[in-house]
């Protein structure tokens, strides 16, 4: 029975702070063995650091990309692990960027996230090269930097595992999950120059109340028209743990998108609708104000597979 295989902290609720780390496996000789040793003992690090303030609810999810899987673990591969596919025309491209190892560190306090990242990278040493590091925060009532509540239509409670955790379809990797991550930068001057009514059409919800627009008010290119996926009348959901980040002094305002799913194909279909359009050309207008600058796909092994 796959339901009893413990998964990493994928289904845990979104916290006030997070650090997203994407790294490449270095070419030094013992890189793979160091990464295996550190990653198999992540739960020990989480216990030690988390114990210093149990109310901070520290967790750390660890995932691996296609290009590093063979060097780290050899055969077999998780059934749907492949490199992130770049998509969309040049003016709104979703790039595929380097990244072999992923850490999603979450806690109610930034000091606890920071300590976890520092200890983890200290142990990994020269075996990895950090490609991207983002420190995310909760913004008021879970708003994205563009001012709308983000995460409302996420699955909740018992609904989460069937959408996010691999089951009998890939028995060797049951209990695992797939994560697609993208770092977006927003043109806030252009976004703020729009009327609130136009912003609401782009997102498909009311800005202040977070209530969904009626079907006859919602354009076919609204974000929530293009990201709702139905197969044979059944909705296919993903779990999004997006976080705002930024540096006002440098004019940087961003959203770190992360979507956990049982199969990456659902998130990929959403991305295709957003970037290419559905039908082609009917693309997500949020992308006129938001640029994806990274793109990665990772497999998140179950706790047992990670510790082995
Ligand atoms: C610029 C980056 C993004 C921003 C600022 C953003 C923001 C939002 C907001 C404000 C909502 C409405 C509230 C909610 O239901 O959560 C939403 C909904 C949603 N977004 Fe995004 N999003 C971004 C990227 C993405 C990407 C890349 C995907 C998928 C590949 C995605 C998938 C979804 C889904 C599935 C929903 C719920 C649709 C529904 O069931 O009504 N989003 N997003």
Image (tube, rainbow, N blue to C red):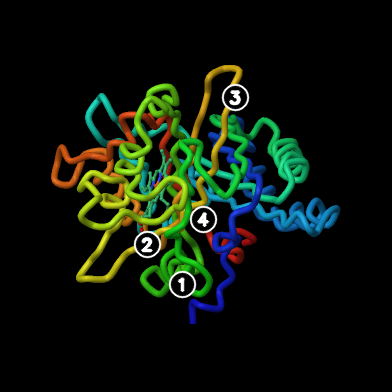
Category of crowding for the residue at label 1, using alpha-carbon neighbours closer than 10 angstroms: few (below 14), some (14–19), many (at least 20): few
**Dot placed on the residue nearer the N-terminal end, 3 or 2:** 2
Write down the quadrant of residue 78 in the picture: bottom left
Category of crowding for the residue at label 2, using alpha-carbon neighbours closer than 10 angstroms: few (below 14), some (14–19), many (at least 20): many
Q: Secondary structure at mark 4?
A: strand
**Dot placed on the residue nearer the N-terminal end, 2 or 4:** 2
**Dot placed on the residue nearer the N-terminal end, 3 or 1:** 1
**Labelled disc at residue 247:** 3
Compared with 240, 243 (above or below) is above
Compared with 167, 154 (above or below) is above
Mark 1 Cβ and ligand 1 under 8 Å apart: no
Q: CA distance from mark 2 to mark 4?
A: 18 Å
Write down the quadrant of residue 284 in the picture: top left
What x and y, as percent, mark residue 93? 30, 30
Q: Quickly name the residue at label 4.
A: 300
Category of crowding for the residue at label 3, using alpha-carbon neighbours closer than 10 angstroms: few (below 14), some (14–19), many (at least 20): few
Q: Quickly name the residue at label 1.
A: 159
Mark 2 Cβ and ligand 1 under 8 Å apart: yes
Q: Can residue 303 be seen by looking at this rendering?
A: yes
The residue located at (61%, 34%) in the rendering is 128
The residue located at (73%, 42%) in the rendering is 110
What x and y, as percent, mark residue 196? 38, 37
Q: Quickly name the residue at label 2.
A: 237
Label 2 close to label 1 by CB (< 8 Å):
yes
Label 1 close to label 4 by CB (< 8 Å):
no
Q: Secondary structure at mark 1?
A: helix
């Amino acid at each position: 029975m796959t339901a009893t295989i413990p998964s990493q902290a994928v289904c845990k609720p979104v916290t006030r702070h997070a650090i997203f780390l994407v790294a490449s496996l270095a070419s030094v000789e013992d890189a793979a063995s160091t990464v295996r040793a550190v990653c198999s003992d992540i739960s020990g690090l989480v216990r030690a650091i988390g114990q210093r303030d149990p109310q901070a609810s520290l967790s750390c999810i660890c995932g691996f990309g296609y290009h590093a899987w063979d060097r780290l673990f050899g055969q077999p591969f998780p059934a749907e692990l492949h490199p992130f596919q770049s998509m969309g025309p040049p003016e709104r491209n979703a790039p595929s960027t380097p990244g072999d190892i992923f850490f999603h560190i979450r806690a109610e306090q930034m000091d606890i996230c920071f300590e976890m990242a520092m200890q983890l990278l200290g142990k990994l040493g020269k075996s990895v090269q950090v490609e991207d590091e983002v420190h995310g925060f909760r913004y008021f009532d879970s708003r994205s930097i563009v001012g709308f509540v983000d995460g409302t239509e996420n699955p909740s409670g018992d609904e989460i595992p069937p959408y996010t955790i691999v089951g009998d379809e890939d028995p060797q990797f049951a209990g695992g999950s797939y994560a697609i991550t993208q770092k977006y930068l927003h043109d806030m001057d252009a976004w703020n120059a729009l009327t609130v009514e136009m912003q609401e059409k782009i997102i498909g919800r009311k800005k202040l109340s977070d209530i969904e627009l009626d079907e006859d008010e919602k354009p076919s290119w609204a974000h929530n028209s293009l990201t709702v996926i139905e197969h044979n009348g059944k909705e296919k959901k993903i779990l999004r743990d997006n976080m705002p980040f930024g540096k006002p002094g440098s004019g940087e305002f961003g959203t770190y998108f992360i979507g956990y799913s049982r199969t990456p194909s659902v998130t990929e279909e959403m991305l295709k609708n957003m970037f290419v359009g559905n039908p082609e050309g009917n693309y997500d207008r949020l992308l006129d104000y938001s640029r994806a600058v990274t793109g990665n796909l990772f497999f998140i092994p179950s706790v047992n597979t990670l510790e082995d």
